[in-house]
Protein backbone atom coordinates (compact mmCIF):
# COMPACT_ATOMS: atom_id res chain seq x y z
CA UNK A 1 0.00 0.00 0.00
CA UNK A 2 1.42 3.43 -0.93
CA UNK A 3 1.58 6.35 1.50
CA UNK A 4 -1.34 7.98 -0.27
CA UNK A 5 -3.37 4.77 -0.16
CA UNK A 6 -2.60 4.33 3.53
CA UNK A 7 -3.62 7.90 4.26
CA UNK A 8 -6.82 7.47 2.31
CA UNK A 9 -7.59 4.25 4.16
CA UNK A 10 -7.06 5.88 7.58
CA UNK A 11 -9.15 8.89 6.61
CA UNK A 12 -11.97 6.68 5.39
CA UNK A 13 -11.88 4.77 8.68
CA UNK A 14 -12.14 8.05 10.59
CA UNK A 15 -15.05 9.24 8.47
CA UNK A 16 -16.73 5.84 8.81
CA UNK A 17 -16.93 6.33 12.57
CA UNK A 18 -18.94 9.56 12.29
CA UNK A 19 -22.57 9.47 13.44
CA UNK A 20 -25.14 8.91 10.68
CA UNK A 21 -27.32 11.89 11.52
CA UNK A 22 -29.92 11.93 8.74
CA UNK A 23 -31.74 14.89 7.17
CA UNK A 24 -32.03 18.58 8.04
CA UNK A 25 -31.89 22.20 6.87
CA UNK A 26 -29.18 24.81 6.77
CA UNK A 27 -30.42 27.37 9.28
CA UNK A 28 -31.37 30.85 8.10
CA UNK A 29 -33.24 33.53 10.06
CA UNK A 30 -36.57 32.67 8.43
CA UNK A 31 -36.39 29.27 10.17
CA UNK A 32 -36.36 30.58 13.74
CA UNK A 33 -39.91 29.46 14.53
CA UNK A 34 -39.68 26.42 12.28
CA UNK A 35 -36.77 25.00 14.25
CA UNK A 36 -38.71 25.55 17.47
CA UNK A 37 -41.98 24.10 16.17
CA UNK A 38 -40.72 21.26 13.97
CA UNK A 39 -37.61 19.97 15.67
CA UNK A 40 -39.00 16.44 15.25
CA UNK A 41 -38.56 16.83 11.48
CA UNK A 42 -34.85 17.55 11.90
CA UNK A 43 -32.11 15.07 12.78
CA UNK A 44 -29.57 17.85 13.39
CA UNK A 45 -29.26 21.54 12.61
CA UNK A 46 -26.69 22.83 10.13
CA UNK A 47 -25.65 26.41 10.89
CA UNK A 48 -23.48 29.07 9.29
CA UNK A 49 -21.46 30.18 12.33
CA UNK A 50 -20.24 33.32 10.56
CA UNK A 51 -23.80 34.65 10.44
CA UNK A 52 -23.91 34.71 14.23
CA UNK A 53 -21.01 37.11 14.61
CA UNK A 54 -19.50 40.27 13.18
CA UNK A 55 -15.84 39.98 12.29
CA UNK A 56 -14.30 43.28 13.37
CA UNK A 57 -10.96 42.34 11.81
CA UNK A 58 -7.73 40.92 13.17
CA UNK A 59 -6.59 44.31 14.53
CA UNK A 60 -9.71 44.87 16.66
CA UNK A 61 -9.42 44.44 20.46
CA UNK A 62 -12.37 42.04 20.35
CA UNK A 63 -12.41 40.54 16.88
CA UNK A 64 -15.66 38.54 16.88
CA UNK A 65 -18.77 40.27 18.19
CA UNK A 66 -21.31 37.53 18.60
CA UNK A 67 -24.98 38.40 18.03
CA UNK A 68 -26.51 37.16 21.23
CA UNK A 69 -29.98 36.78 19.75
CA UNK A 70 -28.57 34.41 17.11
CA UNK A 71 -26.49 32.54 19.63
CA UNK A 72 -29.53 32.09 21.87
CA UNK A 73 -31.45 30.48 19.00
CA UNK A 74 -28.60 28.07 18.31
CA UNK A 75 -28.22 27.34 22.03
CA UNK A 76 -31.87 26.40 22.25
CA UNK A 77 -31.62 24.17 19.18
CA UNK A 78 -28.49 22.55 20.59
CA UNK A 79 -30.47 21.34 23.60
CA UNK A 80 -32.48 19.12 21.26
CA UNK A 81 -30.37 18.54 18.17
CA UNK A 82 -26.76 17.95 17.14
CA UNK A 83 -25.24 21.06 15.56
CA UNK A 84 -23.13 20.93 12.41
CA UNK A 85 -21.12 23.97 11.31
CA UNK A 86 -20.90 25.12 7.70
CA UNK A 87 -18.84 28.28 7.65
CA UNK A 88 -18.38 30.74 4.82
CA UNK A 89 -15.57 32.97 6.05
CA UNK A 90 -12.40 30.90 6.28
CA UNK A 91 -11.46 31.71 2.67
CA UNK A 92 -9.08 28.79 2.63
CA UNK A 93 -8.26 29.45 -1.02
CA UNK A 94 -6.97 33.00 -0.49
CA UNK A 95 -3.36 33.34 -1.54
CA UNK A 96 -2.36 35.12 1.65
CA UNK A 97 -1.46 33.58 5.01
CA UNK A 98 -4.13 31.35 6.55
CA UNK A 99 -6.34 33.33 8.90
CA UNK A 100 -5.44 31.52 12.12
CA UNK A 101 -7.63 33.87 14.16
CA UNK A 102 -10.61 32.67 12.17
CA UNK A 103 -9.57 29.05 12.69
CA UNK A 104 -9.46 29.72 16.44
CA UNK A 105 -12.98 31.15 16.35
CA UNK A 106 -14.22 28.09 14.43
CA UNK A 107 -12.48 25.88 17.00
CA UNK A 108 -14.29 27.67 19.82
CA UNK A 109 -17.63 27.11 18.12
CA UNK A 110 -16.88 23.48 17.31
CA UNK A 111 -16.11 22.88 20.99
CA UNK A 112 -19.07 24.94 22.19
CA UNK A 113 -21.58 22.79 20.29
CA UNK A 114 -19.55 19.55 20.11
CA UNK A 115 -19.97 19.54 16.35
CA UNK A 116 -19.18 16.07 14.94
CA UNK A 117 -17.62 17.71 11.87
CA UNK A 118 -17.42 21.15 10.28
CA UNK A 119 -17.10 22.41 6.74
CA UNK A 120 -16.30 25.40 4.54
CA UNK A 121 -15.94 26.15 0.84
CA UNK A 122 -13.08 25.41 -1.53
CA UNK A 123 -12.84 29.00 -2.66
CA UNK A 124 -11.72 32.48 -1.66
CA UNK A 125 -13.97 35.25 -0.36
CA UNK A 126 -11.42 37.77 0.87
CA UNK A 127 -8.05 39.12 -0.13
CA UNK A 128 -5.52 41.33 1.62
CA UNK A 129 -6.24 45.04 1.30
CA UNK A 130 -3.99 48.03 1.04
CA UNK A 131 -2.42 47.44 4.45
CA UNK A 132 -2.23 44.85 7.22
CA UNK A 133 -5.47 46.03 8.79
CA UNK A 134 -7.76 45.92 5.80
CA UNK A 135 -9.03 43.27 3.47
CA UNK A 136 -10.89 43.15 0.20
CA UNK A 137 -13.90 41.00 -0.50
CA UNK A 138 -14.97 40.11 -4.03
CA UNK A 139 -18.49 39.83 -2.61
CA UNK A 140 -18.85 36.14 -3.49
CA UNK A 141 -16.98 32.84 -3.26
CA UNK A 142 -14.62 32.60 -6.23
CA UNK A 143 -13.01 29.33 -7.28
CA UNK A 144 -9.31 28.54 -7.09
CA UNK A 145 -7.49 27.21 -10.15
CA UNK A 146 -7.05 23.44 -9.97
CA UNK A 147 -3.26 23.51 -10.21
CA UNK A 148 -0.56 21.64 -8.30
CA UNK A 149 0.70 24.87 -6.73
CA UNK A 150 -2.78 25.59 -5.34
CA UNK A 151 -3.16 22.01 -4.18
CA UNK A 152 0.11 22.22 -2.23
CA UNK A 153 -1.06 25.45 -0.59
CA UNK A 154 -4.41 23.95 0.35
CA UNK A 155 -2.88 20.76 1.73
CA UNK A 156 -0.89 22.84 4.20
CA UNK A 157 -3.96 24.82 5.21
CA UNK A 158 -6.27 21.85 5.60
CA UNK A 159 -3.58 20.17 7.71
CA UNK A 160 -3.40 23.31 9.88
CA UNK A 161 -7.19 23.40 10.34
CA UNK A 162 -7.29 19.71 11.18
CA UNK A 163 -4.42 20.07 13.63
CA UNK A 164 -6.39 22.72 15.54
CA UNK A 165 -9.97 21.42 15.32
CA UNK A 166 -10.26 17.81 16.44
CA UNK A 167 -13.13 16.68 14.21
CA UNK A 168 -13.21 16.00 10.46
CA UNK A 169 -13.10 19.03 8.21
CA UNK A 170 -15.08 18.93 4.97
CA UNK A 171 -14.62 21.09 1.90
CA UNK A 172 -17.49 21.87 -0.44
CA UNK A 173 -17.20 21.69 -4.22
CA UNK A 174 -17.63 25.08 -5.80
CA UNK A 175 -20.11 26.64 -8.12
CA UNK A 176 -18.58 28.76 -10.87
CA UNK A 177 -19.88 30.72 -13.83
CA UNK A 178 -16.58 31.32 -15.62
CA UNK A 179 -14.28 28.59 -16.92
CA UNK A 180 -10.58 29.04 -16.30
CA UNK A 181 -8.65 27.43 -19.16
CA UNK A 182 -5.44 25.39 -18.92
CA UNK A 183 -6.04 24.08 -15.40
CA UNK A 184 -3.69 21.26 -14.50
CA UNK A 185 -6.38 19.04 -12.97
CA UNK A 186 -10.08 18.55 -13.32
CA UNK A 187 -12.19 19.50 -10.30
CA UNK A 188 -12.78 15.83 -9.29
CA UNK A 189 -9.05 15.09 -9.63
CA UNK A 190 -8.27 18.09 -7.47
CA UNK A 191 -10.84 17.21 -4.80
CA UNK A 192 -9.69 13.59 -4.74
CA UNK A 193 -6.05 14.58 -4.38
CA UNK A 194 -6.86 17.03 -1.61
CA UNK A 195 -8.89 14.43 0.29
CA UNK A 196 -6.22 11.76 -0.21
CA UNK A 197 -3.32 13.95 0.91
CA UNK A 198 -5.05 15.52 3.92
CA UNK A 199 -7.72 13.04 4.99
CA UNK A 200 -10.31 15.79 4.83
CA UNK A 201 -13.86 14.90 3.91
CA UNK A 202 -16.04 16.31 1.16
CA UNK A 203 -19.30 18.14 1.38
CA UNK A 204 -20.80 17.31 -1.98
CA UNK A 205 -23.19 20.03 -3.03
CA UNK A 206 -25.26 18.18 -5.60
CA UNK A 207 -26.93 21.37 -6.79
CA UNK A 208 -23.56 23.03 -7.39
CA UNK A 209 -22.68 20.09 -9.64
CA UNK A 210 -25.99 20.44 -11.48
CA UNK A 211 -25.44 24.18 -11.94
CA UNK A 212 -21.92 23.71 -13.29
CA UNK A 213 -22.97 20.81 -15.49
CA UNK A 214 -25.82 22.89 -16.93
CA UNK A 215 -23.66 25.92 -17.62
CA UNK A 216 -20.45 24.24 -18.70
CA UNK A 217 -21.81 21.29 -20.62
CA UNK A 218 -20.67 18.20 -18.77
CA UNK A 219 -22.54 15.33 -17.16
CA UNK A 220 -23.43 15.84 -13.51
CA UNK A 221 -23.45 12.10 -12.89
CA UNK A 222 -20.06 11.65 -14.56
CA UNK A 223 -18.63 14.38 -12.34
CA UNK A 224 -20.02 12.88 -9.15
CA UNK A 225 -18.85 9.37 -9.94
CA UNK A 226 -15.36 10.63 -10.74
CA UNK A 227 -15.08 11.65 -7.08
CA UNK A 228 -13.78 9.44 -4.32
CA UNK A 229 -17.20 9.03 -2.75
CA UNK A 230 -15.79 7.42 0.39
CA UNK A 231 -14.77 10.97 1.37
CA UNK A 232 -18.29 12.36 1.13
CA UNK A 233 -19.79 12.97 4.58
CA UNK A 234 -22.55 15.47 3.84
CA UNK A 235 -24.70 16.36 0.83
CA UNK A 236 -26.26 19.72 0.10
CA UNK A 237 -29.44 19.81 -1.92
CA UNK A 238 -31.02 23.02 -3.21
CA UNK A 239 -32.80 24.78 -6.04
CA UNK A 240 -31.75 27.48 -8.46
CA UNK A 241 -32.97 30.05 -10.94
CA UNK A 242 -31.90 31.86 -14.10
CA UNK A 243 -29.92 35.09 -14.09
CA UNK A 244 -28.53 36.72 -17.25
CA UNK A 245 -29.60 33.56 -19.11
CA UNK A 246 -27.47 31.37 -16.84
CA UNK A 247 -28.70 28.79 -14.32
CA UNK A 248 -27.50 29.89 -10.88
CA UNK A 249 -27.16 28.42 -7.42
CA UNK A 250 -29.60 30.92 -5.95
CA UNK A 251 -31.19 28.48 -3.46
CA UNK A 252 -34.51 29.53 -4.91
CA UNK A 253 -37.05 27.52 -2.95
CA UNK A 254 -37.59 23.80 -3.48
CA UNK A 255 -34.87 21.37 -4.50
CA UNK A 256 -34.26 21.20 -8.26
CA UNK A 257 -35.77 18.22 -10.07
CA UNK A 258 -32.38 17.19 -11.46
CA UNK A 259 -31.03 16.98 -7.90
CA UNK A 260 -33.87 14.66 -6.88
CA UNK A 261 -33.10 12.50 -9.91
CA UNK A 262 -29.48 12.11 -8.90
CA UNK A 263 -29.95 11.82 -5.16
CA UNK A 264 -30.88 8.12 -4.71
CA UNK A 265 -27.89 6.89 -6.67
CA UNK A 266 -25.54 9.34 -4.96
CA UNK A 267 -26.76 8.41 -1.48
CA UNK A 268 -26.32 4.74 -2.24
CA UNK A 269 -22.79 5.32 -3.54
CA UNK A 270 -21.47 7.29 -0.54
CA UNK A 271 -20.61 4.71 2.16
CA UNK A 272 -19.67 7.30 4.77
CA UNK A 273 -22.59 9.65 4.19
CA UNK A 274 -23.87 11.11 7.47
CA UNK A 275 -26.21 13.93 6.47
CA UNK A 276 -28.36 15.44 3.73
CA UNK A 277 -28.88 19.17 4.21
CA UNK A 278 -31.55 21.19 2.39
CA UNK A 279 -30.53 24.81 1.87
CA UNK A 280 -32.72 27.61 0.60
CA UNK A 281 -32.65 31.39 0.57
CA UNK A 282 -34.59 32.89 3.48
CA UNK A 283 -36.58 35.08 1.12
CA UNK A 284 -38.31 31.94 -0.11
CA UNK A 285 -39.75 30.91 3.22
CA UNK A 286 -42.92 33.02 2.89
CA UNK A 287 -43.63 31.30 -0.43
CA UNK A 288 -42.81 27.76 0.71
CA UNK A 289 -44.09 28.03 4.26
CA UNK A 290 -43.31 25.47 6.92
CA UNK A 291 -45.25 22.86 4.95
CA UNK A 292 -43.08 23.43 1.90
CA UNK A 293 -39.91 22.97 3.91
CA UNK A 294 -41.33 19.86 5.55
CA UNK A 295 -42.17 18.45 2.13
CA UNK A 296 -38.57 18.80 0.94
CA UNK A 297 -37.34 17.20 4.16
CA UNK A 298 -39.80 14.31 3.76
CA UNK A 299 -38.60 13.68 0.23
CA UNK A 300 -34.97 13.71 1.32
CA UNK A 301 -35.79 11.42 4.23
CA UNK A 302 -37.43 8.91 1.91
CA UNK A 303 -34.16 8.65 0.00
CA UNK A 304 -32.12 8.50 3.20
CA UNK A 305 -34.35 5.83 4.76
CA UNK A 306 -34.47 3.74 1.61
CA UNK A 307 -30.72 3.53 1.52
CA UNK A 308 -30.19 3.00 5.24
CA UNK A 309 -32.91 0.38 5.54
CA UNK A 310 -31.41 -1.41 2.54
CA UNK A 311 -27.92 -1.12 4.02
CA UNK A 312 -29.13 -2.49 7.36
CA UNK A 313 -30.85 -5.41 5.63
CA UNK B 1 2.83 36.59 -5.11
CA UNK B 2 1.60 35.68 -8.56
CA UNK B 3 -1.38 33.59 -7.34
CA UNK B 4 -2.40 36.48 -5.12
CA UNK B 5 -2.12 38.85 -8.07
CA UNK B 6 -4.26 36.49 -10.12
CA UNK B 7 -6.92 36.39 -7.41
CA UNK B 8 -6.91 40.17 -7.06
CA UNK B 9 -7.34 40.54 -10.81
CA UNK B 10 -10.10 37.90 -10.93
CA UNK B 11 -11.89 39.66 -8.07
CA UNK B 12 -11.66 42.97 -9.94
CA UNK B 13 -13.13 41.44 -13.10
CA UNK B 14 -15.86 39.68 -11.11
CA UNK B 15 -17.08 42.97 -9.71
CA UNK B 16 -16.90 45.23 -12.74
CA UNK B 17 -18.01 44.77 -16.33
CA UNK B 18 -16.02 47.89 -17.18
CA UNK B 19 -12.88 46.12 -15.97
CA UNK B 20 -13.78 43.13 -18.16
CA UNK B 21 -14.26 45.42 -21.15
CA UNK B 22 -10.85 47.00 -20.55
CA UNK B 23 -9.23 43.56 -20.55
CA UNK B 24 -11.01 42.55 -23.73
CA UNK B 25 -9.99 45.80 -25.45
CA UNK B 26 -6.36 45.89 -24.35
CA UNK B 27 -5.35 43.00 -22.10
CA UNK B 28 -1.72 44.04 -21.74
CA UNK B 29 -2.59 47.49 -20.51
CA UNK B 30 -5.54 46.43 -18.38
CA UNK B 31 -3.57 43.75 -16.54
CA UNK B 32 -0.27 45.62 -16.42
CA UNK B 33 -0.48 46.31 -12.71
CA UNK B 34 -0.74 42.62 -11.85
CA UNK B 35 2.31 40.35 -11.58
CA UNK B 36 0.95 37.39 -13.58
CA UNK B 37 2.33 34.29 -15.28
CA UNK B 38 1.47 33.85 -18.96
CA UNK B 39 -1.06 31.15 -18.05
CA UNK B 40 -2.76 33.37 -15.49
CA UNK B 41 -2.88 36.16 -18.04
CA UNK B 42 -4.55 33.88 -20.60
CA UNK B 43 -7.04 32.69 -17.98
CA UNK B 44 -8.05 36.23 -17.14
CA UNK B 45 -8.32 37.22 -20.79
CA UNK B 46 -10.59 34.24 -21.35
CA UNK B 47 -12.64 34.96 -18.23
CA UNK B 48 -13.18 38.59 -19.23
CA UNK B 49 -14.74 37.46 -22.52
CA UNK B 50 -17.12 34.92 -21.00
CA UNK B 51 -20.83 35.57 -20.48
CA UNK B 52 -20.50 34.10 -16.97
CA UNK B 53 -18.74 37.30 -15.90
CA UNK B 54 -22.06 39.10 -16.24
CA UNK B 55 -23.45 36.65 -13.70
CA UNK B 56 -20.50 37.22 -11.36
CA UNK B 57 -20.98 40.98 -11.55
CA UNK B 58 -24.74 40.66 -11.00
CA UNK B 59 -24.19 38.39 -8.01
CA UNK B 60 -21.61 40.79 -6.61
CA UNK B 61 -24.09 43.66 -6.90
CA UNK B 62 -26.94 41.59 -5.51
CA UNK B 63 -24.92 40.34 -2.54
CA UNK B 64 -23.59 43.79 -1.77
CA UNK B 65 -26.92 45.58 -1.96
CA UNK B 66 -28.50 42.88 0.19
CA UNK B 67 -26.45 44.13 3.13
CA UNK B 68 -27.79 47.64 2.69
CA UNK B 69 -31.38 46.54 2.13
CA UNK B 70 -31.17 44.39 5.25
CA UNK B 71 -29.72 47.05 7.53
CA UNK B 72 -31.14 50.22 5.95
CA UNK B 73 -34.40 49.14 4.25
CA UNK B 74 -36.23 52.43 4.67
CA UNK B 75 -33.25 54.39 3.41
CA UNK B 76 -33.08 52.37 0.21
CA UNK B 77 -36.86 52.63 -0.17
CA UNK B 78 -36.78 56.42 0.16
CA UNK B 79 -33.92 56.70 -2.32
CA UNK B 80 -36.13 54.89 -4.83
CA UNK B 81 -34.92 55.39 -8.38
CA UNK B 82 -31.92 57.35 -7.07
CA UNK B 83 -30.66 54.33 -5.12
CA UNK B 84 -28.67 52.93 -8.02
CA UNK B 85 -26.70 56.13 -8.60
CA UNK B 86 -26.04 56.60 -4.87
CA UNK B 87 -24.97 52.99 -4.44
CA UNK B 88 -22.76 53.16 -7.53
CA UNK B 89 -21.01 56.25 -6.19
CA UNK B 90 -20.51 54.57 -2.83
CA UNK B 91 -19.18 51.37 -4.38
CA UNK B 92 -16.86 53.25 -6.73
CA UNK B 93 -15.16 54.76 -3.71
CA UNK B 94 -15.06 51.80 -1.41
CA UNK B 95 -14.33 48.08 -1.70
CA UNK B 96 -16.91 45.75 -0.16
CA UNK B 97 -16.60 44.99 3.52
CA UNK B 98 -17.86 41.64 4.80
CA UNK B 99 -18.61 43.28 8.14
CA UNK B 100 -22.22 44.40 7.71
CA UNK B 101 -22.02 47.06 10.40
CA UNK B 102 -18.99 48.74 8.88
CA UNK B 103 -20.37 48.50 5.34
CA UNK B 104 -23.64 50.09 6.51
CA UNK B 105 -21.87 52.78 8.53
CA UNK B 106 -19.81 53.80 5.51
CA UNK B 107 -22.86 53.84 3.26
CA UNK B 108 -24.83 55.89 5.80
CA UNK B 109 -21.92 58.34 6.02
CA UNK B 110 -21.90 58.60 2.23
CA UNK B 111 -25.66 59.34 2.16
CA UNK B 112 -25.35 61.93 4.94
CA UNK B 113 -22.43 63.59 3.14
CA UNK B 114 -24.47 63.81 -0.07
CA UNK B 115 -27.36 65.32 1.89
CA UNK B 116 -24.97 67.79 3.51
CA UNK B 117 -23.57 68.79 0.14
CA UNK B 118 -27.07 69.44 -1.14
CA UNK B 119 -26.81 66.63 -3.70
CA UNK B 120 -29.62 64.56 -2.19
CA UNK B 121 -32.85 66.26 -1.28
CA UNK B 122 -35.15 63.45 -0.27
CA UNK B 123 -37.84 64.01 2.38
CA UNK B 124 -37.40 61.96 5.56
CA UNK B 125 -34.03 60.61 4.39
CA UNK B 126 -31.65 62.05 7.00
CA UNK B 127 -33.71 60.96 10.00
CA UNK B 128 -34.38 57.55 8.47
CA UNK B 129 -30.76 56.71 7.73
CA UNK B 130 -29.67 57.90 11.19
CA UNK B 131 -32.43 55.90 12.87
CA UNK B 132 -31.83 52.71 10.90
CA UNK B 133 -28.10 52.80 11.46
CA UNK B 134 -28.55 53.37 15.20
CA UNK B 135 -31.07 50.52 15.35
CA UNK B 136 -28.60 48.12 13.74
CA UNK B 137 -25.62 49.29 15.78
CA UNK B 138 -27.43 48.69 19.03
CA UNK B 139 -28.83 45.35 17.86
CA UNK B 140 -25.39 43.92 17.11
CA UNK B 141 -23.59 45.50 20.06
CA UNK B 142 -21.98 42.86 22.33
CA UNK B 143 -24.56 42.89 25.13
CA UNK B 144 -22.73 40.66 27.60
CA UNK B 145 -19.51 42.69 27.88
CA UNK B 146 -21.43 45.99 27.80
CA UNK B 147 -23.79 44.95 30.59
CA UNK B 148 -20.81 43.78 32.65
CA UNK B 149 -19.10 47.12 32.08
CA UNK B 150 -22.24 48.98 33.18
CA UNK B 151 -22.41 46.94 36.40
CA UNK B 152 -18.73 47.48 37.08
CA UNK B 153 -18.97 51.24 36.54
CA UNK B 154 -22.01 51.50 38.81
CA UNK B 155 -20.12 49.70 41.58
CA UNK B 156 -16.84 51.57 41.19
CA UNK B 157 -18.12 55.07 40.46
CA UNK B 158 -21.55 55.42 42.09
CA UNK B 159 -21.33 59.18 41.59
CA UNK B 160 -19.72 58.95 38.14
CA UNK B 161 -20.97 61.00 35.20
CA UNK B 162 -24.23 59.97 33.61
CA UNK B 163 -24.51 58.60 30.11
CA UNK B 164 -27.07 56.81 28.01
CA UNK B 165 -26.99 53.03 28.53
CA UNK B 166 -24.67 51.52 25.88
CA UNK B 167 -27.50 49.24 24.70
CA UNK B 168 -29.79 52.20 24.06
CA UNK B 169 -29.82 54.94 21.44
CA UNK B 170 -31.91 58.03 20.91
CA UNK B 171 -32.83 58.89 17.33
CA UNK B 172 -33.87 62.44 16.44
CA UNK B 173 -36.65 63.03 13.92
CA UNK B 174 -38.11 66.02 12.17
CA UNK B 175 -41.30 64.06 11.53
CA UNK B 176 -43.46 62.03 13.92
CA UNK B 177 -41.48 58.77 13.95
CA UNK B 178 -44.14 56.15 14.61
CA UNK B 179 -46.38 56.90 11.61
CA UNK B 180 -43.29 57.57 9.49
CA UNK B 181 -41.77 54.20 10.36
CA UNK B 182 -45.09 52.50 9.71
CA UNK B 183 -45.19 53.96 6.18
CA UNK B 184 -41.62 52.79 5.60
CA UNK B 185 -42.37 49.32 6.93
CA UNK B 186 -45.23 49.02 4.45
CA UNK B 187 -43.05 50.44 1.67
CA UNK B 188 -45.57 53.18 0.96
CA UNK B 189 -44.33 55.68 -1.59
CA UNK B 190 -43.73 59.18 -0.15
CA UNK B 191 -44.95 61.84 0.52
CA UNK B 192 -46.66 60.93 3.79
CA UNK B 193 -49.13 63.74 4.27
CA UNK B 194 -50.49 62.38 7.53
CA UNK B 195 -47.09 62.53 9.28
CA UNK B 196 -46.67 65.64 11.40
CA UNK B 197 -43.53 67.76 11.18
CA UNK B 198 -41.69 68.90 14.30
CA UNK B 199 -38.96 67.90 16.71
CA UNK B 200 -39.27 64.31 17.91
CA UNK B 201 -37.10 61.75 19.68
CA UNK B 202 -37.37 57.98 19.80
CA UNK B 203 -35.66 55.76 22.35
CA UNK B 204 -34.23 52.49 20.99
CA UNK B 205 -33.79 50.20 23.95
CA UNK B 206 -32.01 46.88 23.49
CA UNK B 207 -31.16 46.20 27.13
CA UNK B 208 -33.34 43.11 27.41
CA UNK B 209 -32.20 41.44 24.19
CA UNK B 210 -35.09 42.62 22.01
CA UNK B 211 -35.69 46.04 20.51
CA UNK B 212 -38.17 48.26 22.32
CA UNK B 213 -38.96 51.66 20.81
CA UNK B 214 -40.72 54.44 22.61
CA UNK B 215 -41.23 58.13 21.89
CA UNK B 216 -39.68 60.55 24.36
CA UNK B 217 -40.95 63.93 25.48
CA UNK B 218 -39.00 66.86 24.12
CA UNK B 219 -36.84 67.67 27.14
CA UNK B 220 -35.97 64.02 27.80
CA UNK B 221 -35.23 63.46 24.14
CA UNK B 222 -32.92 66.47 23.93
CA UNK B 223 -31.12 65.43 27.10
CA UNK B 224 -30.61 61.80 26.06
CA UNK B 225 -29.74 62.62 22.46
CA UNK B 226 -26.57 64.21 23.80
CA UNK B 227 -25.56 60.70 24.90
CA UNK B 228 -23.03 61.65 27.58
CA UNK B 229 -22.17 64.51 29.91
CA UNK B 230 -25.73 64.55 31.20
CA UNK B 231 -26.39 66.74 34.22
CA UNK B 232 -27.47 64.59 37.18
CA UNK B 233 -29.64 67.45 38.38
CA UNK B 234 -31.51 67.79 35.11
CA UNK B 235 -35.28 67.22 35.31
CA UNK B 236 -36.01 63.52 34.88
CA UNK B 237 -32.41 62.38 35.20
CA UNK B 238 -32.95 60.64 38.54
CA UNK B 239 -35.94 58.74 37.16
CA UNK B 240 -34.02 57.66 34.05
CA UNK B 241 -31.13 56.57 36.25
CA UNK B 242 -33.50 54.48 38.35
CA UNK B 243 -34.95 52.95 35.16
CA UNK B 244 -31.45 52.10 33.95
CA UNK B 245 -31.75 54.20 30.79
CA UNK B 246 -29.00 56.38 32.22
CA UNK B 247 -25.97 54.70 33.75
CA UNK B 248 -22.93 55.74 35.73
CA UNK B 249 -19.64 55.89 33.86
CA UNK B 250 -15.97 56.26 34.57
CA UNK B 251 -15.05 59.87 35.51
CA UNK B 252 -12.98 61.59 32.86
CA UNK B 253 -10.14 62.29 35.28
CA UNK B 254 -9.87 58.56 36.12
CA UNK B 255 -9.82 57.65 32.47
CA UNK B 256 -7.20 60.31 31.81
CA UNK B 257 -5.01 59.17 34.72
CA UNK B 258 -5.12 55.54 33.62
CA UNK B 259 -3.74 56.34 30.16
Image (cartoon, rainbow, N blue to C red):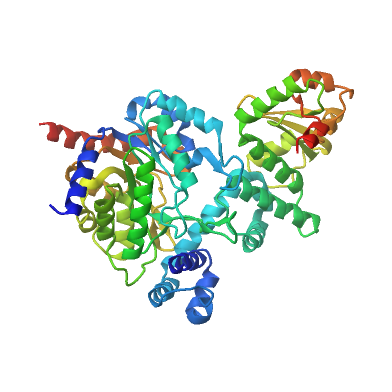
Relative to residue A71, is residue A263 drawn left or right? left
Residue A174 visible: no
Residue B171: x %, y % from top left:
75, 37
Q: How many marks?
A: 0
How far across and how far down the image is residue B162, in percent? Answer: 81, 27
The reply to whether residue A190 is in sight is yes
Judge from the rendering whether residue A284 lies leftward or rightward of residue B254; answer left or right. Answer: left
Residue at 68% x, 41% y is B132
- Residue beneath the point at 77% across and 42% down: B193
Q: Is residue A50 above or below residue A240?
A: above
Of B73 and B259, nearer the camera is: B259
Residue A178, picture quadrant: bottom left
Where, quadrant-wise, is the C terminus of chain B in this rendering? Answer: top right
Instruction: State the residue in front, B157 or A253.
Output: B157
| Residue B13 higher or lower than A228, as above or below | below
Q: Quadrant of residue A192?
A: bottom left
Name the quadrant containing residue A130.
bottom right
Where does residue B81 sit, x and y in percent of width and height? 65, 57
Q: Nearer the viewer, residue A81 or A59?
A: A59
Residue furthest to the left in view is A313
Q: Against A95, is B188 above or below?
A: above
The residue shown at (36%, 43%) is A163
| Residue A3 location (% of width, % of height) | 19, 53
Side of A223 where A246 appears, left or right: right
> Is B244 rendered above or below residue B145?
above
Amino acid sequence: MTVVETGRHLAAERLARLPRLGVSVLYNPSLRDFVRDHAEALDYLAIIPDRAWQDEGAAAPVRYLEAESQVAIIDRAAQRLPIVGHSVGLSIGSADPLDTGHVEQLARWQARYAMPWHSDHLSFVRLPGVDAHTELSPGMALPVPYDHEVLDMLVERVDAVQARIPVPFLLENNVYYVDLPEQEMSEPEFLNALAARTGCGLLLDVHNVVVNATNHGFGARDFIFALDLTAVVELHIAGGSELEGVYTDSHAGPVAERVWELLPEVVAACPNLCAITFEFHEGWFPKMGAEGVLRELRMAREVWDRHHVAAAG
Amino acid sequence: MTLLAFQLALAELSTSLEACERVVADPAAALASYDLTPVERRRLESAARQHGMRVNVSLYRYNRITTLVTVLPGTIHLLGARARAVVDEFWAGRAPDRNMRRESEHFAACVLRMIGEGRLEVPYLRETVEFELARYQVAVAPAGPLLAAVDEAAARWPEGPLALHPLARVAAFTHDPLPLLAHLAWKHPPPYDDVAEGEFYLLLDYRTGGLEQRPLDLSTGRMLHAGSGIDAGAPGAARLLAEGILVRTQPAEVAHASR
